[in-house]
Amino acid sequence: MADRQQPQPASTGTTSADAAVELAEIERRQQEVIKAALVPVWFWWVMGAAIVAIGAARDSHDRVVMATAIPLAVLVMAVLIIATIPGVRRRVKVHSAVMPSAQAAIAIPGLILLVDGVTIACSMSLTEHHVSHPLTLGSAAGAAALVIAGPLLNRYFGRLMLTNARQHIADAPDGGAPWRGLFGTDPGGRPAGHATSASERGTR
Amino acid sequence: MSTAGFDELIHAPTRLEIVSLLAAAEWADFKYIRDELGLSDSALSKQLSTLESAGYVEIHRRFVGKRPRTSASLSTAGRRAFEQHVAALQQILARSRQDAGAASATEAGRGVVRR
């Protein structure tokens, strides 16, 4: 199969508009796979709520509340993290060449440091100023940082993965210039995202 | 670098969608592909069989507990054919842009001569 004769593109009767539509369709499908690998927005909100629950439990100074709420919140966080690791209980596994592994190795610990740093700094500052419920407020600040930074990180990973996917499949002899051009407008002048889907081009 | 090679098998709309999904993935569940593309089980099976016969796709059948689970992945030959197909599409676009550029340059030249 690999040694098949390669027909010349010119003989296919495929117009440049058809080619642009086809490339847009390829990218749309790849975006869907990438989207499946990203964590949903609610993930950050649930994680934030769990962080606030831990802070509030510590502030309560009630042993029963601490003994139940803290392990429960940690369990929720652990389950969420494990469930969202790419490949675990997923219906699709993103190709390793598309995954932003190197950037993730820096960005994820960076996010954890940011959230912990904000939580600890706010909690200590509020405790020093004798504000009531300092740990609850401190963890709420940390949760807010997570809810803001998490989706931003998600978007960053999404962009990286799409770039990786393009580089992975579009290692074209001309450097992939037309492929990059898809993100502006296609030759018909339509935005790439509005291109006719491949399924509309013909019968299945 | 990929050599351009237009592939009629991949060019078919549904197969292009399947191969595009699989190109970004290590593997994908049969149900995931079916749901994403809005196909019936039989329609997807038919297309996957065609791609499998061509050596482009590998079908994996395994059991998770007692439930059978089918997944598909792009073979090395399938990935190469897809890359070549993408390169061919890019060539068509690039050629069209070159032609359009040459045409507009000729038109501009005529305008200068007319003046």
Image (tube, helix red, strand yellow):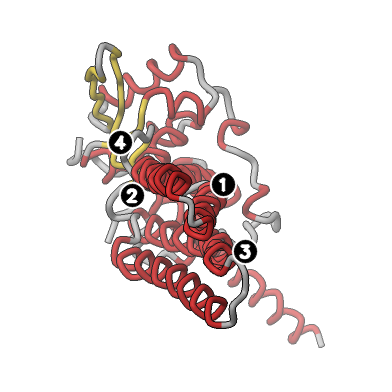
Q: How many marks?
A: 4
A49, above or below B109, in the image: above
Q: Which residue position holds label 3? A: A184
* CA separation in Å, label 1 and label 2: 36 Å
User: Where the N terminus of chain A falls, by quadrant?
Assistant: top left
Q: Secondary structure at mark 2?
A: helix
A26, above or below B45, in the image: below
Q: Which residue position holds label 4? A: B27
Q: Nearer the viewer, residue A181 or A111?
A: A111
Mark earlier in primary sequence (2, 4): 4
* CA separation in Å, label 1 and label 4: 26 Å
* CA separation in Å, label 4 and label 3: 30 Å
Q: Nearer the viewer, residue B54 or A54?
A: A54
* Residue plotted at (64% across, 77% down): B105
Does the residue at mark 1 contact the one at mark 4 (Cβ under 8 Å)?
no
* CA separation in Å, label 1 and label 3: 31 Å
* CA separation in Å, label 2 and label 3: 22 Å
Q: Secondary structure at mark 4?
A: strand
Parent chain of label 4: B
- Closest to the camera, between mark 1 and mark 4, is 1
Q: Secondary structure at mark 1?
A: helix
Amino acid at the residue labelled 4:
Trp
Residue B74: x %, y % from top left: 28, 37
Answer with left or right where residue A146 lies relative to residue A176: right
Residue B18: x %, y % from top left: 42, 33
Q: Which residue position holds label 1? A: A42
Q: Which residue position holds label 2? A: B83
* Residue plotted at (36% across, 28% down): B29
Snapshot quadrant of residue A120: bottom left
Residue A23: x %, y % from top left: 50, 49
Amino acid at the residue labelled 2:
Glu
